[in-house]
Image: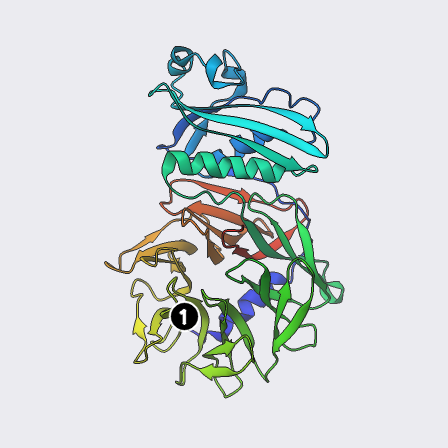
C-alpha cells in the first residue's frame, strides 16, 4: 500500500469539484424488512400551516429504518385524538402503532398536541402538548419524532440533532468552499463559513456549540474553532506542515489532531484552554484521523506502520498502540460507537471503499454500505445510523446507513458536491 499521504491528497481532491446547494433532500435507498408498521395521521387543524408536522414526523420515522409508515391514501379514517381511534380498523391494516394529533395557532406561535397509540395493546403510550415559538414547526416535529422513537424502541431519538458538512462550488481558480450546518434530515441549512480555499474535517464540540475544522485560507492548513451561533472563531493551530483531523475529547477540554511539525504526521493532543500540544505517537509512519472513545480513555487512529492504512487504539494510560483491524489491506477513518463497543470505518474490499463496522470484542468486520467510493463516516449520537460521503455519478453526496446495514438513505444536493459530514451530539 502506498503512503497515507495519498489519503490526504484524496480528501483534498474530492473537495475540489463542482457546485453545492444549501438544503439537502432525502432519498430512501434501502428499507429494512424488519421495520415496524406505523400510521401517522395528518394532524387536525394543520391546513394552511407553514409546515406539515405529521409529514415531517412520518419522514423522520421512515428515515430511521425502524418504521414502515402507512401511506395516507390507505387510511380508512383520520382520527385526531385517542378517544376516536378504532383499534380494529387499524389492526386490519396491519398497523402496530398510530400517531394522532391536532394543531392550532396561538399568539406568537402554535400548539401541537400528539398521542402515540399501541394498536395491538389497545392503549395510549404517550401524549404531549408542544408549544412552538414563532414558526419553528420543523423543530417541533423533530422533537415529536424523538419522543415517539424512544417510546417504542427505548433508544433516544436523534432527529433533533444537526449535521455539519462541506460544499464546493466552481472549477479551477474560481472555487468557493462552504461549511454548513443543517438539521439531521438535511433541511434548514445555514452557512457557517465561506472561503476561496478548501475547508475540511469539521468536528463538533461535545456540547454542540462549536465546530473545529481545517481551513487553507492562509494557503496552508490551520485548525480553527468556531462558535456556531455567533460565528466567533480562533485559530487553534497553524504549525508548519500538516494541521489536520481535529477531534474533540468527550469533556471538551482537549482536541486530538494530526500534526507534522516535527517530521511525519503524528497524533497530538491540544489543551483547548491554553493551546499547548502534547505528542502522543512517535514513529516513522504516518499517524492521522484520531477519534476519542466515549469514556475519553482511548484514542483510535489510522496508521500505515504495518505497511498499509490500519486502525490502532492507544490507551491514554500509556503503552504501545494496539492494532485493531486485520481484514484486508485498507481500513481507515475509524469512529467509535456511542457505547464504545464497536468501531465504524472505511474498508477497502474488491467492491471498493465501503462503510463497515467491527466489534471490539470479536474483531469481526462487516460491510454495511452498498456504494463503492465512501469516506468520512460519522456516527449518530444514539448509534443507530452512520452518515458518510460518497459519489453519485460525478457528484459528491451524503448517504447514511443503519448500524445493522438493513436500511439506508441518500441526501443528494440539488446542484453538486457535498463532503465531510459530521453528526452533532444530542442538543438541548
Q: How many marks?
A: 1
Query: Foreground: 298 or 329?
Result: 298
Query: Horizontal and vertical percent for residue 390?
Result: 52, 53
70 w.r.t. 136: above or below: above
Query: Foreground: 290 or 90?
Result: 90
In the image, what residue occupies the spot 40% across and 74% down?
A: 303
Residue 76 shows up from this direction: yes
Query: Horizontal and vertical percent for residue 255?
Result: 50, 72
Q: Is residue 71 left or right of residue 297?
A: right
Image quadrant in which you'd find residue 362: bottom left
373 w.r.t. 130: above or below: below
Residue found at the far left of this picture: 362
Query: Foreground: 103 or 322?
Result: 103
Using a 10 Å C-alpha cutoff, classify the residue at mark 1 as few (fewer than 14 neighbours), some (14 to 19) or many (20 or more): many
Residue 51 shows up from this direction: no
In the image, what residue occupies the spot 51% across and 12% down?
A: 77
Query: Horizontal and vertical percent for residue 305?
Result: 36, 78
- Quarter of the N terminus within the rendering: bottom left
Disc 1 target residue: 301
Image quadrant in which you'd find residue 209: bottom right
In the image, what residue occupies the spot 53% across and 39% down?
A: 143
Query: Horizontal and vertical percent for residue 205?
Result: 53, 63
Amino acid at each position: 500500500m502506498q503512503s497515507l499521504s495519498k489519503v490526504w491528497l484524496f480528501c483534498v481532491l474530492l473537495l475540489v469539484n463542482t457546485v453545492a446547494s444549501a438544503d439537502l433532500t432525502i432519498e430512501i435507498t434501502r428499507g429494512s424488512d424488519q421495520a415496524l408498521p406505523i400510521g401517522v395521521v395528518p394532524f387536525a387543524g394543520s391546513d394552511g400551516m407553514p409546515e406539515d408536522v405529521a409529514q415531517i414526523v412520518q419522514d423522520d420515522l421512515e428515515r430511521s429504518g425502524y418504521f414502515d409508515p402507512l401511506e395516507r391514501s390507505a387510511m380508512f379514517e383520520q382520527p385526531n385524538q385517542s378517544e376516536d381511534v378504532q383499534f380494529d380498523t387499524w389492526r386490519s391494516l396491519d398497523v402496530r402503532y398510530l400517531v394522532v394529533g391536532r394543531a392550532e395557532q396561538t399568539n406568537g406561535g402554535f400548539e401541537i398536541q400528539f398521542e402515540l397509540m399501541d394498536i395491538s395493546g389497545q392503549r395510549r403510550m404517550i401524549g404531549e402538548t408542544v408549544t412552538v415559538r414563532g414558526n419553528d414547526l420543523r423543530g417541533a416535529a423533530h422533537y415529536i419524532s424523538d419522543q415517539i422513537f424512544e417510546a417504542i424502541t427505548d433508544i433516544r431519538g436523534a432527529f433533533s440533532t444537526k449535521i455539519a458538512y462541506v460544499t464546493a462550488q466552481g472549477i479551477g481558480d474560481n472555487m468557493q468552499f462552504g461549511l454548513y450546518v443543517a438539521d439531521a434530515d438535511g433541511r434548514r441549512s445555514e452557512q457557517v463559513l465561506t472561503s476561496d480555499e478548501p475547508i475540511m474535517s469539521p468536528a463538533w464540540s461535545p456540547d454542540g456549540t462549536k465546530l473545529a475544522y481545517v481551513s487553507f485560507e492562509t494557503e496552508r492548513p490551520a485548525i480553527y474553532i468556531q462558535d456556531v451561533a455567533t460565528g466567533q472563531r480562533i485559530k487553534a493551530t497553524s504549525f508548519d506542515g500538516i494541521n489536520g483531523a481535529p477531534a474533540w475529547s468527550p469533556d471538551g477540554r482537549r482536541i486530538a489532531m494530526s500534526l507534522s511539525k516535527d517530521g511525519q504526521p503524528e497524533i497530538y493532543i491540544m489543551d483547548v484552554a491554553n493551546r499547548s500540544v502534547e505528542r502522543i505517537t512517535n514513529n516513522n509512519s504516518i499517524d492521522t484521523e484520531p477519534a476519542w472513545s466515549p469514556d475519553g480513555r482511548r484514542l483510535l487512529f489510522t496508521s500505515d506502520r504495518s505497511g498499509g492504512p490500519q486502525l490502532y487504539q492507544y490507551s491514554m494510560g500509556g503503552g504501545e498502540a494496539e492494532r485493531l483491524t486485520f481484514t484486508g489491506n485498507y481500513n481507515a477513518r475509524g469512529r467509535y460507537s456511542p457505547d464504545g463497543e464497536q468501531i465504524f470505518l472505511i474498508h477497502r474490499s474488491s467492491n471498493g471503499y465501503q462503510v463497515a463496522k467491527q466489534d471490539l470484542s470479536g474483531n469481526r468486520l462487516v460491510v454495511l454500505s452498498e456504494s463503492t467510493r465512501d469516506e468520512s463516516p460519522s456516527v449518530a449520537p444514539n448509534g443507530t445510523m452512520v452518515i458518510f460521503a460518497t459519489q453519485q455519478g460525478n457528484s459528491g453526496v451524503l448517504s447514511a446507513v443503519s448500524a445493522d446495514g438493513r436500511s439506508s438513505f441518500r441526501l443528494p444536493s440539488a446542484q453538486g458536491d457535498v463532503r465531510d459530514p459530521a453528526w452533532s451530539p444530542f442538543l438541548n
